[in-house]
Image (cartoon, rainbow, N blue to C red):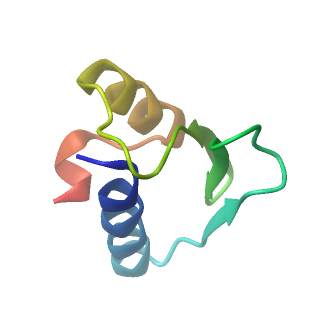
Amino acid sequence: MTGNEFLQALRKTARRNGVPVCVDTRHGKGSHVVVHYGANKTTLKDRRKELPRPLLKKMLRDLGLAENDLR
C-alpha cells in the first residue's frame, strides 16, 4: 500500500465513521506530512512510495485503528 492509497482508505473510513481527517503539509519535513484522524495524529512518509508493513501497523496504532478498519 502506498501513502496515497493509505490516505484514500483513511478518508473513506473517516467518512463511514464520521471522523474528521486533516493532512497537514506544513508540519512535515521534506516529503513527510502529519495526518490527523480525529484527536489522533501520525506522520506519513512519502505519499508516492510503498509503505513497509511495520510502519503501516505503527501508523494505524497511532491513529487508534486496526488493519481491518481500512477495508
List x then y, in percent, for residue 34: 68, 47
Q: What residue occupies the far top of the structure in this picture?
A: 54
List x then y, in percent, for residue 30: 72, 40
Identified at 75% across, 43% down, the residue is 28
Q: Which of 28 and 15 lies nearest the eye of the viewer? A: 28
Above/below status of 58 relative to 15: above
**Residue 43 located left or right of residue 19:** right
Position of the C terminus by quadrant? bottom left
Q: Which of 4 and 21 lies nearest the eye of the viewer? A: 4
List x then y, in percent, for residue 15: 41, 80
Question: In the rendered image, which quarter is residue 10 located in?
Answer: bottom left
**Residue 53 located left or right of residue 57:** left
Above/below status of 19 relative to 24: below
Question: In the rendered image, which quarter is residue 36 located in?
Answer: bottom right
Identified at 29% across, 39% down, the residue is 50
List x then y, in percent, for residue 11: 42, 71
Above/below status of 17 relative to 38: below
Q: What residue occupies the far right of the structure in this picture?
A: 26
**Residue 19 located left or right of residue 41:** left
Q: How many marks?
A: 0
**Residue 38 located left or right of residue 2:** right
Identified at 65% across, 62% down, the residue is 23
